[in-house]
Amino acid sequence: MTMTSFVSLGCSLCLLLGCSFSAGLEVKVGSDVTLTCVYNSGYYGKLSTCWGRGPIPNRGCANQLIQTDGTTVTSRLSERYLLMGNIGEGDVSLTIRQVEERDTGTYGCRVEVPGWFNDRKHQITLTVVPARPDALMVEMQEVGKRSLTVSWSQVFDGGRPITSYRIDIKRQDDPWDSAVTTEVSNPNLTRVSLVDLHPARNYNLCMYAVNILGMSEPSNVLKVTTKEAAPDGPPLDMQLLALSSTSIRVAWKPPSTDLRNGVLQSYSISYREYDPVSRQLKRWQNQRVRATREQETLILTGLKPSTKYGVIIQALTNAGIGPASTLPFVSTLDEVVQTSTQATINTPFTVIWSIEDTTRFIQDHTTSVTDLVHGSTTWQQSSTSFSSESPDPPVVELKEVQDNAVSLSWTAGFEGGAPITGYFLEYKAVNGSWDFKKTVVDFSSNQTEATIIEINPSMYNIRMFATNSHGTSKASNILTFTTGEKGPQKGAVATATSIDTQAATSTVDEAPSGRLVAIVVPVVLLMLFIVAIVTVWQLRRLKGKKGNLNMWLSNGAILYRSSDSTQEL
């Protein structure tokens, strides 16, 4: 979009008084400028007029730009030169469209009045100076749970090349001076993805173009809400209380507000019995409770008396299930015997805490949560499917890390049984989990490079998948990099590792330590084999002898008592 401003010089030719003017005018590159020249057509009638570059000569116009016979334009050097006034009424002002620095110079208007030396001349010196770029028009392309992608078109640079772009993003209710600002140093970009955003949050975003003379006016403001995600935090203040020999009360509060990642829909309460004989946990049972209050309660019934139970609670949004809240085992009460002693012992506040059992439950819990999420019939989460028809993973390369901007490219692998339909990138902090708090950014099948803006400087991992109609590829090589460091970072900050053993074998050379191990291990095994053969040979020789013989070895004594047996002391 080009900024258009009409600048007029309010100076007229005083033809009735026989006067002429010389004036100066300064305008910015890219604007439209009008140089005023008028005469009294009611007195003189319709007169021929011309405009030229340079001082006005004795006859005509030097370097003539445009001419009129008093009614219409009869000649024109370029479509940029226009007579936009009412020519018939004597308005022969010259308009120059989208002026450039080379338009700087002297312009002359000659009105040809009949008679000797009656022509009226008006001379203007025009100076065109460079300016800041025009404002951008930003468009939203994609919105994810923790990312968004925006694009823009190139704008007029103000006469000086655009050197960078600035992106400001903030929470919708916060002032702009609290916005996170990121500079994109590649002026050729027209599309970026911002990552590490918070799910289910309202954001405002605007952009600026920058050249050597300064920053443009702000772009249009994009208002966007990221998609919901599974909760990042577990339910809080979980409590377990044995009410009777067959029931346990479970109480909890919702996850922290900033970790809910959307509107909580329900809670999943899973519990299972601990068998002290086999020292194993039995099959999970599950109940679902709608999320309605800030303090939730559920009573588990139909349990066995004097039995330990493990319980976990998980919050759910429409996007998925969050991490579990856990406590050590709680035991149901003993069956009540109608005696005063038993009534005193069987208080409803009896909770059994076993450090040994708790440790075992927590150790077992890692797999149990996995079983719960992927194997429970109560809920299901889509899992990535691999088949022989799925595409091979792409190979991802880190091109550059500049401050908070990460530029990467990728090369497609074998497309499998159908054409590749797209790619998606997974993005997480180095100390984070691929299962929780990861950002997913989608790309079309024809994209092979992208620039990502990280608004929270830190160290991160990236991996990529390819998809087709048959499924999803395995993960690509993993890139490790650090954002927020001043200056460009190339190569040195990229650490590529592969979770695909076959891919790693074909693309990464073995390290020297690996070759050393490959040599040392067979040698050691060979030596052990030789020692074993010698030992067996010596024992067979001893069996042919009579009497007792003590043979001492490094790990203990072997006493030979007869030809039939050996005993270890």
Image (cartoon, rainbow, N blue to C red):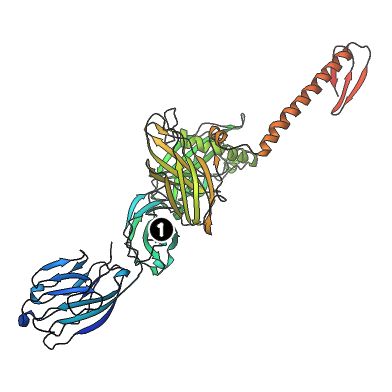
Q: Which of 525 and 49 is in front in this view?
A: 49
Relative to 370, is 547 on the left or the right? right
Rendered position, 370 above or below 530: below
What residue type is disc 1 on?
Answer: Pro
**Residue 372: x percent and y percent?**
48, 36
**Is the residue 26 above or below the residue 516 in the image?**
below
In the picture provided, is 224 more to the left or to the right than 184?
A: left
Q: Say what secondary structure mark 1 lies in.
A: loop
Left or right, residue 260 beside residue 495: left
The image shows residue 551 at horizontal and vertical percentages of 90, 22
Quadrant housing the C terminus: top right
In front: 251, or 27?
Answer: 27
Q: Name the residue under label 1.
A: 187
- How many numbered marks, from 0 up? 1
Query: Does the image show residue 80?
Result: yes
On screen, residue 533 above or below 240: above
Residue 296: x and y, percent? 44, 48
Tell me which corner region of the image, top left, top right, bottom left or bottom right, holds residue 218: bottom left
Relative to the observer, which residue lies in front, 41 or 282? 41
Answer few, some or many: residues within 10 Å of disc 1's Cα (few below 14, many 20 plus, some between 14 and 19): some
